[in-house]
Image (cartoon, rainbow, N blue to C red):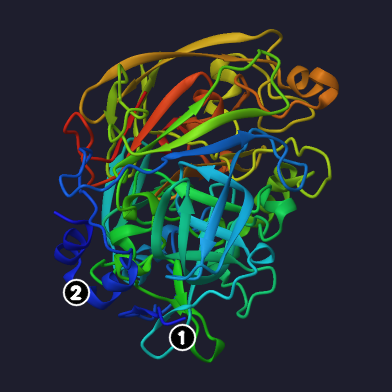
Amino acid sequence: MTRSNKLTIQFGFVLALATGLLGFSGCGGNSGGSTSPGGVSPVSNTQAVAVNIGPANNALNEVFTEVTICNPGTTSCQTIPNVEVDTGSEGLRLLSSQVTLSLPAVTDTSGNGLQECVSFADGSYVWGPVAAADIQLAGEKASSVPIQIISDNPSFAVPSSCTSGGGPNENTAAALGANGILGIGVWQQDCGFGCTPSSTSIPPWYYLCPNSVCTVASVPLLSQLQNPVWTFPQDNNGVMISLPSIPADGAQSVAGSLIFGIGTQTDNALGTAKVYTTDGYGDFQTVYNGISYSNSFLDTGSNGIFFLDSATVGMPICANYPGFYCPASTTTFTATNTGLNGTTAPVSFDIANTEALFAANNGTNVAFSNLGGDNPSSFDWGLPFFYGRKVFIGIENETGPTGTVGPYWAY
Amino acid sequence: MKTVMVVVLFLTFASTPAWAVLGEYANSVASDQQVMHGEVRAIARQGYSVQEIKSGEQTVVREYVSPSGLVFGVAWHGPAMPNLQQLLGSYFAEFQQMRGVYDAGSSQTVRSNVRRRGPIVVRTDKLVVESGGHMRSFHGRAYAPRLFPQNITPEVVQ
């Protein structure tokens, strides 16, 4: 089945939209992990990523890549560096200060531009319009997909639902710590069914602002921000992130790879990785000391491993760095992850003294494999988990090489 | 510039969902349920009660109510962050002040030693807030230690 057929069948009610979204030229995609019988030539599927201090010289354990965006269907393109690679979200979000192209707005039938507000767990948020762009990563291309432009000078006032977390508007490189966020998590869209007209309760996520009054909007799946990977003509069933091991006191910079597709080329075989399917929230279960934390997840966008609390782990919170652990000496923990499919295995990890980490190498290191802090209600396996591993992310509805359909993680 | 995408439908919310409010009396649950188009379930426990509001396919908010009717804790799980300002009520100002320490340094020109966009824990003698998760799965809880009924511990709020 070609990619466009697949979409047309699945989302026939937005046919015009699907055509717009899928205007890639000529060749059919394949719907699974296998080589296309239609004869799509392999393309470069490896995108360089790096952990470093970032565009505002203030990043801590953030992994970046560069992203090329184009006016849909044209060769009018620009490349934006230092976009954070985030497995905890879906879709491309770029600071307005970085975008020089004049991209077409995503609108309703009356021409009102779609706006988006996304809040994070700490109450910080981003706000701005949705526009259409082609996204090029390595040799792969997502054609005419909705992306968010994070406004530093928004046309519409930020809705109160966006600011209700009490955190900052992350609309500058200094606040965001990046020039944008490339969300490549387990879902196809950033919001999904919950934001569609069929949902019985639409969360404050997308907005329309006729006459400058912004109200919550329901949005069909294909007008939402898309994880660009699943819309590629090939290598579209997921990604693999590969970061090397790093020294115990950290590193100033780390080079790695973001590889598109799972089992689609010679460089992205699952190998011995175990597959952990997730629940409907993208989460799996982590058990520590006999207690189960069912909302646990892997997230390159979290800069530490955040788990349990000071009393439970017997490590103080740092005096100077709220939210980070400061054990007297590096401490090893073991917790067991279990997928919805029953795959289960223990993970061992170290937590070092954060004050010592931040002082090492004259305070110039920004990549750490043993940085952690408190988070009592789940295991948030942040970027430290990814060093020294190949981690696969299987996208929902897409079939992996073992026949497992996403959403899943494998490592 | 020909690619104009169409948002097929939009609906206007009558108002933002008004969820249970920490530190206030629980008699507003019926109207919460109405506004959230939700389904309310009351669960009696030894020494307190739980009012659970489910809305949409994946959002649940629980409020923990003392025998005198005060909401001493709230817990949430859903695809989007809840409206913490509404959920925390009069405790929101304290939360906002305390969470500020997480942002300290975010505009520095050297490495910000902060958890950017990560989970957050605020702990004072009046208020505890734990907020975590990721897009499509935010979860957390908030409670007022001074409002706890006798013999009830924070573990019940989840």
Q: Report the chain holding disc 1.
A: A
Question: Of helix, strand and loop, which one carries label 1?
Answer: loop
The N terminus of chain A - image quarter: bottom left
Residue B125 in the figure: left or right of residue A378: right
User: Do we see residue A211 in this rendering?
Assistant: yes
The residue indicated by pointer 1 is A112
Residue A13: image tag: 2
Q: Amino acid at mark 1?
A: Asn
Q: Report the chain holding disc 2.
A: A
Residue A171 in the figure: left or right of residue A278: right
- Vertical comparison of A329 with B86: above or below: above
Give the residue displayed 60% in from the left and 72% down from the top.
Answer: A158
The C terminus of chain A - image quarter: top left
Front position in the image: A25 or A125 = A25
Give the residue displayed 66% in from the left and 32% down from the top.
Answer: A323
Give the residue displayed 49% in from the left and 77% down from the top.
Answer: A104
